[in-house]
Every structure is written in C-alpha cells, then in structure tokens.
Amino acid sequence: MAIRNTTRMCFVVENRRRLMMDLDDQQTVGQVKEEIRQILRLDPDDDLVGIDSHQRKILSLSYAGAILDESWRMYDLGIQPRAQVQCCQS
C-alpha cells in the first residue's frame, strides 16, 4: 500500500509568535524544525565562528504534550489540520 502524500495547514507557536505552515506528510520533524529556524530566524550561531554545532541552541517541537523526535515523519504523528504544534528553544 502506497503512502499518500498530503499537506495540512498547522499553527506553530514559538514564544509570542504564531506561524501558519503547510506540513507535508513526507517531511521529517528535523526538516520542519530547520524550516522554522529559517522562517523565524532562530539560528543563534550565525555570527559565531568556530563554535561546535552541538553548542547550538536546541529547538524542540511538541504536539499533544509529547516532544517530537527529529527522525519521525509527519504522517506518523497523526497531526490534524489546524492543529497547534509548540516550538521552544533551550
């Protein structure tokens, strides 16, 4: 059985910002996080030369109270259209 490729509009909330995004079923959580970083300009290490990528601030996504693993695909998560995905930086 083939996996259907669909998109759904969801809301990503980070601090006081709210972003509407179309999440593609084939995207991984890691890909969505990188897209959010670019859109909201969250990458804090752009100006730091020689800093190890492991020292980069961590961006995490959660849905229904669970932190989402970077390798998970959106179709595995059962995120409904117009759902809210929480985004936080630590």
Image: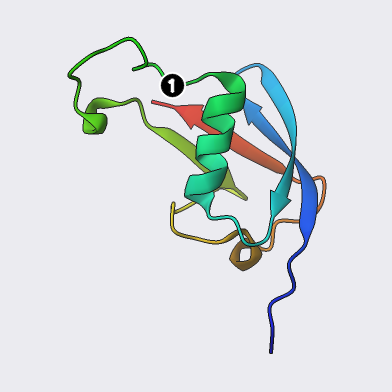
What residue is at 30 percent from the left and 26 percent from the top?
56
Q: Amino acid at mark 1?
A: Asp
Across and down, in percent, residue 85 comes to: 65, 41
Tell me if residue 67 can be seen: no
| Residue displayed at 77% across by 55% down | 7
* 85 relative to 50 in the view: left or right: right
- Dividing the picture into quarters, in which one does residue 54 lie? top left
Above or below, 20 relative to 18:
below
Seen in the picture, residue 49 relative to 82 is either above or below; the reply is above
Q: Residue at 81% across / 52% down in the picture?
A: 81
Q: Nearer the viewer, residue 70 or 86?
A: 70
Q: How is the image coloured?
A: rainbow
Q: Residue at x 38, y 25 (%)?
A: 90
Residue 12 location in percent, x, y?
A: 67, 34
Asked if residue 55 lies left or right of residue 15, the reply is left
Percent x, y of residue 37: 52, 28
Say which residue label 1 marks: 43
